[in-house]
Amino acid sequence: MKKRRFEMDDGFRPEIVQGARFDGFLEIPVIEKPAHIVIPDSIVPFSHAKGEVTNNTALCFNDMDIVFADVIRHPEDHLDTIAKFPIVISPDPSMYRDQPLSTQLMNIYRNRAIGYFFQSKGIYVIPQIRWGDERTYTKSIFSEKAAFLGAPKHSIVMVSTYGCIQGPDNKMHFKNGLYSMLKELEPQVVLVYGPMPDSVFGEFLKDTRFIQYQDYVSRRCKDGKR
């Protein structure tokens, strides 16, 4: 496949979502519900993918965006590395509440588009759900909750608190978005990458099964490794 010089060539890689279903008025590519739920033993970020593969390790993209930017631009170039993992979490381009709404929506699209592409190659994909400001996780602007489009209902998803719940304002938005996600997707299992404080999750523990994973840096420090 000829590599493009620019991400915008030919309309932002339409071949990546060839064969996909599209969800909602925004037409977000769908990551299909898996036939069965697989729960990882551990989760490793893309930046530490080498040498960390086990029979039940999940690969995530909870890194600085620059680390996995080429995966977003050219996912086909990274299939050899990614396909070594039995489970892959859909990529997680950063979403900030002070971003323009158009950028937040683009990163929702990218998450699902690359996740769908990996799934189309036979990889077991778990959607990572990320929301920005309240316009993405409520119906205050749109008739649908944009942050949850393209993700399957009654299935398994991942959320990350790593770097997302410092301070009361961040914590409030995360908790409000989590509540909205649980109502919208009704997941059977929610993987939580990072801290899982009772002040955020406590009232929701009866609604679904949560499984918490330490972020990679904290886990390695705890194990005495760097």
Image: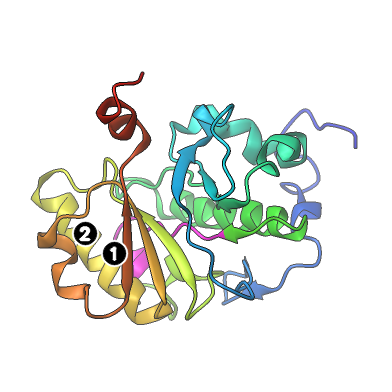
* Residue 140 visible in the current orientation: no
Q: Residue furthest right?
A: 1
Rate crowding at label 2 as few (under 14), some (14 to 19) or many (20 or more) other CA atoms within 10 Å: some
* Residue 178 visible in the current orientation: yes
- Quadrant that contains the C terminus: top left
Query: Residue 89's x, y, as percent?
Result: 53, 52
Q: Look at label 2 and name its amino acid.
A: His
Residue 23 position (above or below residue 62):
below
- Image colouring: rainbow
Residue 205 position (above or below residue 123):
below
Residue 134, which numbered label? 1
Left/right of residue 214 with respect to residue 12 in the rendered view: left
Query: Residue 204's x, y, as percent?
Result: 21, 74
Residue occupying image coordinates x 41% and y 55%: 101
Tell me the chief SS of the magenta region: loop
Residue 173, which numbered label? 2
Query: Residue 71's x, y, as percent?
Result: 64, 37
Region rendered in magenta: 126-138
**Reading the chain from its start, which is encountered first: label 1 or label 2?**
1
Residue occupying image coordinates x 59% and y 27%: 50
Nearest the camera: 42 or 34? 42
Query: Residue 158's x, y, as percent?
Result: 42, 59
Residue occupying image coordinates x 81% and y 45%: 10
Left/right of residue 197 with respect to residue 129 in the rendered view: left
Q: Look at label 1 and name its amino acid.
A: Glu
Q: Residue furthest top?
A: 226
Asked if the residue under mark 2 is in contact with the one under mark 1, i.e. CB atoms within 8 Å, the reply is: yes
Residue occupying image coordinates x 30% and y 74%: 180
Nearest the camera: 188 or 78? 188
Secondary structure at numbered mark 2: helix
Cα gap from disc 1 to disc 2, whole angstroms: 7 Å
